[in-house]
Each structure stands twice: as C-alpha cells, then as structure tokens.
Image: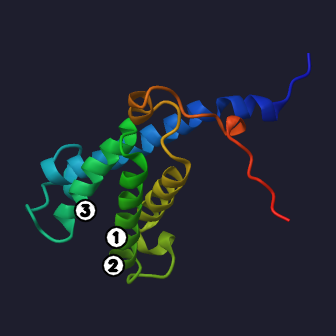
C-alpha cells in the first residue's frame, strides 16, 4: 500500500478548516462575553465595559456577535472581515503607539486574530458550517473545485 502524507493531509482539510474556524470564532466570542458581561475574568481582569462606550463596547459586541457567527459558520465571510478589521483597528489605535513590534506592545492577540479572520474570510466557512448546511449541502473540497483556466 502506497502511503502519501499529502493525500492524507488533503483529506483532512475540511475537518481542520472547520475546527480552525470554530475555535477562532469561539475564542473571539469569549473575549466579547468577558468584556460585556464580566464573565470569564471580565474586561481585562475584572468588570465590564460601559455600554455604548467608544470603542470598547462596540469592539466587544463585534467580538461576541462576530465570533459566534464565525464559529457557527453563518454569514462567515462578512463576519470574518468585520472581525479582522476590528482587530487591525485595535492594533493600530491601541498597541502600535506603544512600540513597533507586537511582542513589545502587547498586540500579538490582535495581530493573530486579525490574520486568522482574514484567512477565514478568504477560505470561507468550509464544509461543516451551519450556513453551508442551510444551503443544502457541503462545500466542495479544494481538489473538487474547478481549476483556474490558464491564460496565454
């Protein structure tokens, strides 16, 4: 029997993509819940963000709602773009003024969430998403999609 690691990894892609989307969205939603409701350690270690306060309360709403939508796979691309943008805004408005690099300014989570959501926006929800199931099926695997037509 011929074992091909590439074939095995390719066959795992839908599951890995779904787990990545689900965990990223769930963790982001936890940040929102912590800030809005004071659960899970509250807003940065205790308490809640005052209602309608700019930008903290709005960011927490985006985290909670956007994270939940991404985790479920509903309106995934739109929610992921908004979540990614909110993390880019957070990085450049809060962290970047403290130091140049994320390791120095405490902005690593913002950068990682920003790029993770951008990746999710580009890849889409994948096969195991509520939105895909509501459309009546599963998303085609990468090797099932039509190959781009070469131009000369």
Q: Residue at x 39, y 35 (%)?
A: 131
Determine contact: label 1, label 3, CB under 8 Å. Answer: yes
Q: Residue 22, percent across and down?
A: 43, 38
The C terminus lies in quadrant? bottom right
Q: Residue 122, percent across and down?
A: 54, 54
Which residue position holds label 3?
A: 59
- Above-or-below relation of 110 to 131: below
- Above-or-below relation of 64 to 110: above
Q: Residues within 10 Å of mark 2 (few under 14, many from 20)?
A: few
Q: CA distance from mark 1 to mark 3?
A: 9 Å
Q: Is residue 147 left or right of residue 24?
A: right
Q: Is residue 144 visible in this depiction of the protein?
A: yes
Q: Is residue 68 left or right of residue 116?
A: left
Q: Residue at x 39, y 66 (%)?
A: 85
Describe the element under mark 3 as helix, strand or loop.
helix
Q: Residue at x 48, y 71 (%)?
A: 102
Which residue position holds label 1?
A: 90
Determine contact: label 2, label 1, CB under 8 Å. Answer: yes
Question: Colour mode?
Answer: rainbow
The disc label shown at residue 93, or none: 2
Q: Is residue 31 visible in this depiction of the protein?
A: no
Q: Earlier in the sequence, mark 3 or mark 2?
A: 3
């Amino acid at each position: 029997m011929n074992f091909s690691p590439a074939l095995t990894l390719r066959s795992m892609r839908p599951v890995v993509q779904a787990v990545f989307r689900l965990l990223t969205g769930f963790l982001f939603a936890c940040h929102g819940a912590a800030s809005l409701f004071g659960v899970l350690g509250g807003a940065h270690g205790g308490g809640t963000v005052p209602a309608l306060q700019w930008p903290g309360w709005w960011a927490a709403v985006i985290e909670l709602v956007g994270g939940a939508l991404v985790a479920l796979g509903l309106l995934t691309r739109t929610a992921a773009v908004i979540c990614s943008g909110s993390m880019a805004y957070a990085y450049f408005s809060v962290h970047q003024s403290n130091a140049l690099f994320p390791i120095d300014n405490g902005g690593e989570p913002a950068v990682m969430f920003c790029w993770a959501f951008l990746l999710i926006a580009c890849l889409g929800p994948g096969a195991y998403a509520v939105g895909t199931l509501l459309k009546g099926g599963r998303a085609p695997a990468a090797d099932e999609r039509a190959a781009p037509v070469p131009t000369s």
